[in-house]
Amino acid sequence: MTATGQHLRTAAAAGPAAVRVVDAVKVYGRGDTEVRALDGVSVDFPVGRFTAVMGPSGSGKSTLMHCAAGLDTLTSGAALLGDTDLATLDDRRLTLLRRDRIGFVFQAFNLLPTLTVAENITLPSALAGRPVDQEHVDRIVDTVGLRDRLHHRPGELSGGQQQRVAVARA
């Protein structure tokens, strides 16, 4: 199954979405080893809203999020960030889009162990060659309660603190 123009027009009529997934199918393997991780999933993540994706282990939550963010490709269907169909982007443009428009909090957090908390939080700006908006960083750091840990490295933090660093970086 593939997303057609009609599917996308129907989804667009539902209103603005930060991310929209339409008729998403993701299949891993073939034949006897085939696993259908997503089977015709359609979902909108509204602009300006927090959305929880919940379900039992193995239900496709991570696969859905990876495909919606352009970290993995769909077998069929469509994943859109705003009005950009991720399948239309080459690797370079997809990398730039992820760097500039998407914040990730991975299950393993993916903090760089040699960087301090402050450096991990500002890493996306450094990679993009953009100046750090220190006022914005200060607000985020205060919001997640890491002010007293800015000069620590991830190995010196609790799991919860590491998660908050990942949230602040995203």
Image: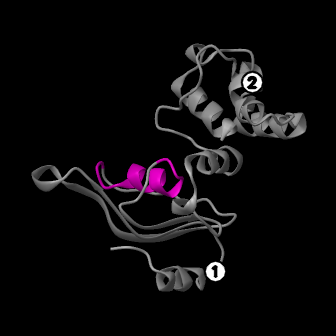
Residue under the point 40% across and 59% down? 74
Quarter-of-image position of residue 76:
bottom left
Local SS, label 1: loop
In this rendering, is residue 170 above or below 156? below
Q: Residues within 10 Å of mark 1 (few under 14, many from 20)?
A: few
Q: Amino acid at mark 1?
A: Gly
Residue at image position (74%, 21%) is 150
Residue 167 lies, in percent from the top left, at 63, 39
Residue 64 in the magenta stretch? The answer is yes
The answer to if 3 sits in the magenta stretch is no
In the depicted view, which residue is nearer to us: 84 or 18? 84
Helix, strand or loop at label 2? It is helix
Identify residue for label 1: 15
Question: In the image, what residue occupies the spot 58% across and 27% down?
Answer: 162
- Estimate the x, y position of residue 45 in percent, counting from the top left: 57, 66
Disc 1 to disc 2, C-alpha distance = 37 Å
Disc 2: CA contacts within 10 A as few (<14), some (14-19) or many (>=20): many
Q: Is residue 12 left or right of residue 41?
A: right
Q: Quadrant of the C terminus?
A: top right
Q: Are marks 1 and 2 in contact (CB under 8 Å)?
A: no
- Image coordinates for residue 127, horizontal then vertical, percent: 72, 32
Q: Which residues are magenta?
A: 57-71
Which residue is label 2 attached to?
118
